[in-house]
C-alpha cells in the first residue's frame, strides 16, 4: 500500500513542533528521556513528531473542564 500525499503523516522536528503545541524544546527533549508523554519516532538518529499523534496524546491527558454548580440549599452538586 502506497501512502498518498494527503494520507501521509506530517512529521516535524522537535524545534518545529514545540511552538505549535506551546511546549519548550527543552521539555520535549527531557520528555523523550524520562516520561515519554509526547509520542515520537526515531529514524536514522533523527527524532520526528507526527503533529496529529501529538495532538491526540495531549487531548487524552486533558483534565478539568466546567465545574458543576452547587445547590445553594444543600451545598451539594
Image (cartoon, helix red, strand yellow):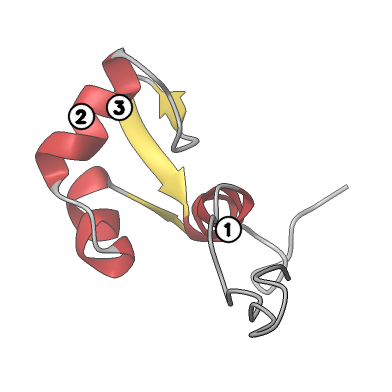
The 10 Å Cα crowd at callout 3, few under 14, some 14 to 19, many 20 or more, is some
Q: Earlier in the sequence, mark 3 or mark 1?
A: 3
Q: Which mark is residue 29?
A: 2
Q: Which mark is residue 59?
A: 1
Expressed as whole percent of the image width and height from the top left, the position of residue 1 reads 88, 47
Expressed as whole percent of the image width and height from the top left, the position of residue 54 reads 50, 51
The C terminus is located in which quarter? bottom right
- What number of labels is visible? 3
* Mark nearer the viewer, 1 or 2: 1
Expressed as whole percent of the image width and height from the top left, the position of residue 41 reads 48, 30
Tell me where residue 27 sits by quadrant: top left
Say above or below: 47 vs 2.
above
Front residue of this view, candidates 19 and 69:
69
Q: Is residue 41 left or right of residue 66?
A: left
Front residue of this view, candidates 77 and 39:
77
Considering every residue shown, the one lying at the far front of the view is: 73
Q: Cβ–Cβ below 8 Å for labels 3 and 2?
A: yes
The residue identified by callout 3 is 31
Considering every residue shown, the one lying at the far right of the view is: 1
Residue at figure coordinates x 80%, y 52% from the top left: 2
Q: CA distance from mark 3 to mark 1?
A: 17 Å
Residue at figure coordinates x 64%, y 77% from the top left: 70
Q: Is residue 56 left or right of residue 25?
A: right
Mark 1 falls on what kind of element? Answer: helix
Mark 2 falls on what kind of element? Answer: helix
Q: Is residue 57 left or right of residue 49?
A: right
Residue at figure coordinates x 58%, y 58% from the top left: 59
Q: CA distance from mark 1 to mark 2?
A: 20 Å
Q: Is residue 28 left or right of residue 11?
A: left
Considering every residue shown, the one lying at the far top of the view is: 34
Say above or below: 46 vs 1.
above
The 10 Å Cα crowd at callout 1, few under 14, some 14 to 19, many 20 or more, is few
Amino acid at each position: 500500500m502506497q501512502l498518498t500525499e494527503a494520507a501521509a503523516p506530517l512529521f516535524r522536528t522537535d524545534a518545529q513542533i514545540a511552538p505549535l503545541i506551546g511546549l519548550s524544546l527543552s521539555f520535549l527533549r527531557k520528555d523523550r528521556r524520562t516520561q515519554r508523554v509526547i509520542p515520537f519516532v526515531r529514524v536514522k538518529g533523527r527524532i520526528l513528531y507526527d503533529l496529529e499523534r501529538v495532538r491526540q496524546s495531549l487531548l487524552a491527558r486533558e483534565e478539568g473542564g466546567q465545574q458543576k454548580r452547587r445547590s445553594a440549599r444543600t451545598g451539594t452538586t
